[in-house]
Amino acid sequence: MQKSSFEFLLVIALIKYCDGTVFNVVNQNAANYPFNMTLYEDVLNSELCQRQLTYITTNNTLLLLRFYDAGVRIPRSILLGNTVDLGNYQQCININQALEGSDIQGKYCMIKVPTNQSLQISSFLLSKWLKTTPSHLQNDTFSRLGAYDKLENYVKTMFGLHEFKTRIGSLNPNLNLNLAVCIPAPCTTREALSVFYFNITSILQFENDFCRLPGDKPWVPADYVAIIIFSIIGLLVLLSTSYELLHSLILKKGSKEIRTIYRSFSVYTNTRRLLFHKSGLDSLECIDGIRALAMTWVIAGHAILIVFNSINLREAIKWAQSIKAIWITAAPITVDTFFMLSGLLVVYTTAGKLNNMQLLQNLPLFYLHRVLRMFPILAAMILYEVSFQNRVFDGPLWNIQAMSIFACRKYWWSALLHIQNFYNPTNMCIPSTWYLSVDVQLHLLSPIFLFWILSGKKNIVWIVLTIGLLTSLVTATIYNFLQDFQSGIFIQNPLELRRYYVYYYVNTLTRASPFFVGMAYGYILHLWKGKPLEISKFLTLAVWSCMLLILAGVMYCVRINLDVNWDNQLADNILNSFMRPAWAFGLGWLIFACVKGYGGPINWFLCFNMWRLPARLSYAMYIIHFPIIMTVYGSTNVRTLFSVQNLILQIAAFLLITVMIAFVVTVTIDAPFATLIKLLLSKEKISCQKTPVSEISKHVQQSDMKDQNEMNQEENDISKKL
């Protein structure tokens, strides 16, 4: 009974959050609102409302039926956790009928009906309205739900989101049915329901939650800025592509005769380079597979949000708590894969190419290159988020996506400065970009260790790497034991979730250790570059067995706190301190073994050519995927039945859509600006007589362009293939 109660409480809390029906009025700059808040008040007119209601109920039965059909119904599968009926959003707001002196316009509203009220009405009359009533349900079903309000406000941070506060009514501490109603625009819900449903408001308690109208998304300056900037980019792409096609296909000029800067936005060149990119002799090919699979896992982990839009939520949560769901509930650990790879590549791509003094001389360019290479796609996605995103899509749950739109309009600057995880951790612009903030902050610290790594003195290097790793582990461990966090993003103690997310999950201190583990592996790979490694079969098998056990154990530990009986704070502290570096340690061995020829079938699988494209698109995919998921969620009009098969199909759909959009964005935005940045920094390099900064920062994106001679040679090779 205890486990069942917990599951049902969690279901109700997740419904409450994911439906986005919890809104509160706040004093913010109205220009940032995705919705026109004054419009909802301006359209109210009691006299006009009564005139329209009289016409609808007495003269136009078909129109009345349209309002009924788009409005109130008791939620289906309420005993499976569904307390929401979304009605028919599009049908409602599309109602527009001419009436003498005015137009009858549909208005979509959500109301909250408490289940603990006592209705003084005959069962016959109420059954004509709702077919059934909450009072028909057993009292003990709802007596177990009193604690849901404590869960409600803490589930919000599960996906790094925060409530967008535009609520009309007040919060009710009891369990509510969230019902859609369709009413004429001049009316309040109380006025309309009193007429439509036989004065039901005199006996039925309910609260207004929010309303939506056609044209309630105001044009803001960001919309005009987005139109101008994206139009300029589109024009540049068109002109650049035309320029190259003219010179290469019509005028038959060689690639050396075509100006690089003029063809930088060419779809023709950028697509060929993306599809036919050749790996260097010292490239770590297995990383392509790891990066692509990790990105797929990230999308799968975030796609679980769609599960919470199911009518059988209780069954979905029960499945998520089982060991069968470990492949998706363990997804939060995959972000540490990227941290480890980032640390590994920052060392591997610089060691042997620069000395420590050259690093110091090029330090400003090192930082500049890192920030500039991440800027184009991130800035483009933020600009899309604050403008086109809100204009192109809509739905009954769009207020969820409105949270991110509102956050981006307010905190776009902190996203571009990569300080969101400290400045506005619960109200992030594109919530998944917290990783970029932590990653950039770790790269800002990396030259402290790179200076000694590039000294070429092995003893000093190992001392510095050991100090860095131990410092990150010790400080994080002390911090974790002082704070006593829970050990997972999927809640066991909901009161702790917000604190866990803000002070642990997106905290640079607690996420730094995988980066330092990666730096150590990067140096090991540098030392063994081009050298044969002889390991006995027995030792290879033993190490592989240990590492695979570590990786499997970490995956299990990530989801261990889903057990309702789990209550071990000491274990939580240990897991929070060591499971992430342990994951990085096991993954680092996997890379090292694959590179040195001891990967066997794992290396064969990770080195498939099919991983190269998604690996090169992984940065764009990471930024793009979450808004796509939220767009699908916010524009959903009907709740669906959860099943594992449906979940897999949804993940596959999200992955495919993300890859396609990431491809377009990379070709038209990332690749062109990568070329321009290379040209800009090359000029800076020449003027300062410094070593190539591009050698320092290849790890930022594998799509960094080669110098002009290499690009020409590559294009010649491509032409031969074609």
Image (cartoon, rainbow, N blue to C red):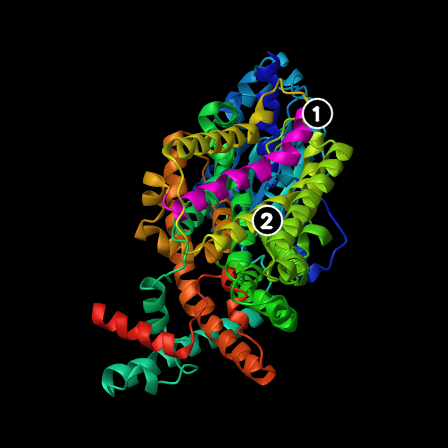
What x and y, as percent, mark residue 664? 40, 63
Residue at mark 1? 569
Magenta run includes residue 578:
yes
Q: Is residue 437 visible?
A: yes
Could you say which disc has been placed on residue 427 in the image? none
In the structure shown, which secondary structural element does the residue marked by tag 1 occupy?
Answer: helix
In the structure shown, which secondary structural element does the residue marked by tag 2 occupy?
Answer: helix
What x and y, as percent, mark residue 614? 39, 53
Q: CA distance from mark 1 to mark 2?
A: 26 Å
Task: Assess disc 1: are there few (<14), some (14-19) or many (≥20) residues with their C-alpha within 10 Å of its C-alpha.
Answer: some
Task: Give the magenta range.
Answer: 570-597
Horizontal relation, residue 646 to residue 561: left or right: left
Horizontal relation, residue 37 to residue 248: left or right: right
Residue at 69% x, 22% y: name it.
146
The residue closer to the viewer here, 56 or 281, is: 281
Quadrant hosting residue 660: bottom left
Residue at mark 2? 515
The amino acid pointed to by label 2 is: Phe
First reached walking from the N terminus: tag 1 or tag 2 = 2
The amino acid pointed to by label 1 is: Gln
Compared to residue 379, the image places residue 333 above or below, namely: above
The residue closer to the viewer here, 571 or 197, is: 571
